[in-house]
Amino acid sequence: MKITKYVLCLALACSMPACVELDVPPLNVVQNDDIFSSVNGINSYLARVYSGMPMEDFRYSPERGLFNFWALTPMCVVDGEAINRDQGGAQSENTKYWNDGYKSLRDINYFLETLPDYASNFQEADMQTWRGEMYFNRAFVYFALVKRYGGVPIVNEVLNYPEQSIEELMTPRASEEAVWEQIKADCDEAYNLLPETNDLGRATKYAAAALKSRAMLYAGSIAKYNQITLTDDNGNRLCGIPADKATGYFQEAYDAAKLLEGHFSLYMDDWKADDKEAQYQNFVNMFFNDNSSENILIRQYEYPNSVHGYDCYAIPRQFMVGGYSSYICPTLEFVEMFEGFPKDEEGHIVTTDESGHYVLYDNLTDLFANAEPRLRATVILPGDEFKGEAVEMWRGIYTGSVDGGISPLIPEGTLPKYEATDAASVLVTSQSASNQTVYTLSNGQTMNAAGRSGRFQNDAAATISGFAVRKYLNPDMPAAEVVENRSDQSWIEFRYGEILLNRAEAALELAEAGKGANYKEDAFNCINDIRERAGATLLTNSAALTMDTVRIERRKELGFENKTWWDLKRWRILDREQNNTMYRVLNAFYADQAGKWFFDARFDEENRRYTFDTRWYYVEIPTDVINSDDLDQNPGY
């Protein structure tokens, strides 16, 4: 059974109350015998539970706080990996998951309690698998809750009204530590029950280990780095974990990651040593191979029954047919994490020579010609090829003299658009793609002033950073099909690359806690495995490995996979990264009289400023839940 493609024909508790009492049975149309008497009935129930898994995939919208929605403002434009036209600054998730989480928990608990009554209908091995899938899903739900709210009510049995009184149903928040322990227990139970293989989209014992690795790494980080605390009247710590628990959680994360060793491997089907093009293509192809050796758990989509709109929203402007494009414009800060192009001692891109004049390039692609292949597979760089075309992303044409070099168009660190400065007299730019300025060059040829994909002075559907996202964009989708409700590439929820990074980070934390040098050596090897596949330069000295190195490697490898937001939160550094922050962009210009290109790094021209409110490390519990269940609200709300 392909769980995400299964067409549900049963109305299983489509509406339930908001608070924890949950007094409506989950099966209000069909009866238990209809569900628990056949494999088809079980599969329909499983399909419902899996469809409610809180995956932050193509259809997760942090702005609206909704899963299975259209993600016009994805997580990467909130955490600084990218910017887009609709994101004006820092924000928290506008999450509405509390109520949906407890609906899912009720469905899961009901299944676990009811299935034994129908044991005679099924094989014991099948029942073990189904139970394991439910424990996995329960751990996944609790993880989605605890990483947002801290301690939440632990509800592991079906609550029934009026059999139970309102007072009995008022479940208090557990300590945050208790919820992490519940996740660990459910992952362990799932690992013991689940088989090594299962249908695509369904959990295996290794998916359970992967979830445990991710969750325990998060818990260890909270114990070590969190400074926000909240204790209830009974002494339960609702926000935060005692610092002395950090090492134990890092050990759990490391051990769980090791369980996958030998069962999964980095995708290398198309990889060749010393061949940047093959390494680039290998990284691209990894996201379009459902049966990759790297995939641990995926969510499948299939047109027309189950679809998303990723390509339509993210595609560069020149490919737009569905009314949207360029919703994900990677920041220069993200690009600068990679290697293979000139940078200064602070890691910022260098676009000028020693005399302070712009470096001129024969081709638009020359600046990044030696960049690590993983960057090109993650970000469309100016002039890169996509769908058989060069992606035309530049800001304008410089018409002034090039004798003696071209000085910076605007002073470093200043904010105005070029059109509002003295540079306007030697620049030709375009208002928009539909109002493109066509300029006749000195050689008699004509050229669009800003290319077909921008950046334009004023266009709501073009790049605003000088880059476009590449990861997950389908290169084989016909241009006419790049419309809403049409994309169906799978989402990879767990892949072995993440597990190696979990293992490396946990190992380095253990080494720094004095647990032995072998852990640092293992972290070093894991990072080099990732870097080798990426086409990056291998690290040479494990002694010099730092936590910053591991974290940057993680951000590069998992960029635009909706992991960075959570990493920055669990490391408790998002408030430092977004402290009156303005993200930077890279504008390409064509110098007409030289017949060459140059690049200008500057702040985002829309002058957006990002400041992360530290309250957002724990999000607000919905007011209706606080009022109805008499729960403690998180600090600052």
Image: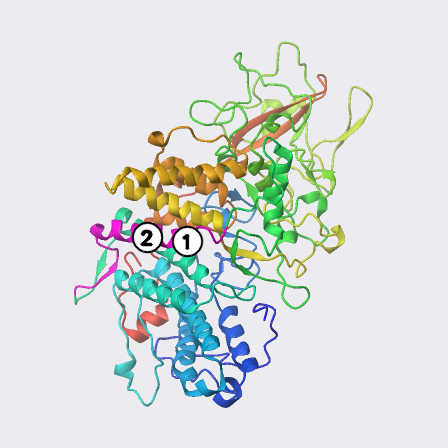
**Of 81 and 453, which appears nearest the observer?**
81
Local crowd size for mark 2, using a 10 Å CA cut-off: few (<14), some (14–19), many (≥20): some
**Of 200 and 390, which appears nearest the observer?**
200
Res 11 seen here: no
Q: Residue furthest top?
A: 404
Sequence-wise first label, 1 or 2: 1
Quarter the N terminus occupies: bottom right
Tell me the quarter of the picture where residue 59 sits.
bottom right
Task: Name the residue tied to disc 1.
Answer: 92
Q: Residue drawn at (51%, 36%), measured in percent from left and top?
A: 532
Whole-angstrom CA distance, mark 1 to mark 2, is 9 Å
Counting labels gives 2
Query: In the rendered structure, are the residues bearing label 1 and label 2 in contact, judged by CB atoms less than 8 Å apart?
Result: yes
**Of 103 and 633, which appears nearest the observer?**
103
Query: Which dot marks residue 615?
Result: 2
| Residue 214 in magenta stretch | no
Left or right of 509 in this view: 611? right
Res 391 seen here: yes
Q: How is the image coloured?
A: rainbow
Tell me the quarter of the picture where residue 132 sits.
bottom left
Position of 499 relative to 189 (above/below): above
Q: Secondary structure at mark 1?
A: loop
Q: Amino acid at mark 1?
A: Ser
Q: Amino acid at mark 2?
A: Arg
Q: Residue drawn at (38%, 80%), measured in percent from left and top?
A: 22
Local crowd size for mark 1, using a 10 Å CA cut-off: few (<14), some (14–19), many (≥20): many
Q: Residue drawn at (62%, 49%), measured in percent from left and top?
A: 314
Quarter the C terminus occupies: bottom left
Query: Which dot marks residue 58?
Result: none
Q: Residue drawn at (56%, 66%), measured in percent from left and top?
A: 199
| Residue 248 in magenta stretch | yes
**Residue range (magenta):** 235-264
